[in-house]
Every structure is written in C-alpha cells, then in structure tokens.
Amino acid sequence: MTVKKPSEHDAAALFQAAVADVTKLPVSTRITHKKPPKFAAFSTPKHSVSIADTLSDFDTGVVPDEFLRNGIARLTLRKLRKLPSQDHLDLHGLTSDAARVLLQQFLYHAKAQNFRCVLVIHGKGMNSQAGIAVLKIRTRHWLMQHEAVLAYCDAPENQGGAGAVLVLLRN
C-alpha cells in the first residue's frame, strides 16, 4: 500500500478550508509588544544623605563567624538563622574601600526602612590572590563596629553559607 503525498495545491486548499471561518481581531484589542530598555533606569534618592565613614579597616585578621553585641542572648543567633532576610547586598568584585562605603549606605537605608534582618554577601575569597578572603574578614570586622548591628552569623547554605552573613539590625 502506498501513501499518496498531498500536492502543494491540496495543502493550500486544506489550509484555506481550515481558516475560512476566522475573523480578524478588532484593532482596539491588539497588544503591541514594546522592547524593554537595555539598561534599567537608575533612580537617585530625592534627598541625598551624607553618611559618615566611621568604619576602620584596621583588624587583627581573626574575625568570628558569629557576633553578638553585649547584652544580647545567645538564643538570638538560633532565631536569626531562621529569619527571612528583608534585603540583600552583594559585595562580590568590589575593592575594600568601595565595599565599606556601600555597606554603610546599605545599613543606613535598611535601618531607615525598619528592616530587622538583612543578608550581606561577601564571597569566600576563592578568586582572591593567595586565597585570602579579604572582603569576608573586613565585612565582618565592619559589621562588629557598626552601631546598628546587634548580631550576625553565617547564612544558611542556600543563601551563601560561609560566603554571606545574616545581620540582625537594631530597631
């Protein structure tokens, strides 16, 4: 048994028969797609605030994985690990000076918005020279100095693990 292949004329006739009852949409119900802009518009705050650079770069080289301000119970760290972060900051690829300034601005704005828990991603230092995690050490040192920070601890593995910290901010 041989299968007869339809000719081009038959295929066109079949298509015309299939779409014979189709009517065009009215112009008013058509949706025109607009291409998104290549770069998102950067919005600057209406009121620029000068944030004092009060954090020191001087450190002993040893910074703890967890930090609690005096008077804060150890149970707070266990609770902090379960809190969802309300905002995050990624410091990957920044110089130490740029990271310090950006961290101060981030903490200022997070406190102004009454955030309690934020995530700061500093990385594990795998791409740094000699394998030293400079931003990890300095970020944690800066967080211990900042008056708005009550506690910090390593983030859960799904949020960066040892390459990020969950930070508890003062009300």
Image (cartoon, rainbow, N blue to C red):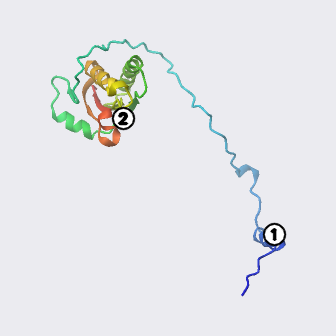
> Which is nearer the eye, 63 or 13?
63
Residue found farthest to the front? 130
**Considering only vertical position in the picture, is 46 above or below 86?**
above
Q: Quadrant of residue 15?
A: bottom right
- The amino acid beneath tag 1 is Ala
- When asked about the image quadrant of residue 169, the answer is top left
Q: Amino acid at mark 2?
A: Gln
Please state the horizontal and vertical placement of residue 91, each as a whole percent of the image. Answer: 40, 27
- Residue 158, position as x, y percentages in the image: 33, 43
Compared across the picture, whether 121 is left or right of 41 comes to left
Question: What residue is rendered at 22% in x and 38% in y?
Answer: 79
Q: Name the quarter where the C terminus is drawn.
A: top left
In space, the residues marked 2 and 1 are separated at their CA atoms by 59 Å
Residue positioned 75% across, 54% down in the render: 26
Labels 2 & 1 near each other (Cβ < 8 A): no
Say which label, 2 or 1, has the lower sequence index.
1
Per the image, label 1 sits on a secondary structure element best described as helix
Q: Which residue is found at the position 52% from the left and 22% from the top?
A: 44
Kind of element beneath mark 2: loop
* Quadrant occupied by the N terminus: bottom right
Label at residue 86: 2
Q: How many marks?
A: 2
Q: Of all residues shown, which one is farthest toward the bottom? A: 1
Residue named by callout 1: 12
Mark sitting on residue 142: none
Which residue is more in the foreground, 84 or 115?
A: 84
Residue 39 coordinates in the image, percent (x, y): 59, 31
Q: Is residue 74 above or below residue 157?
A: above
x and y, in percent, of residue 142 in the image: 30, 20
Q: Name the quadrant containing residue 150.
A: top left
* Nearest the eye: 165 or 162: 162
The residue shown at (36%, 12%) is 53
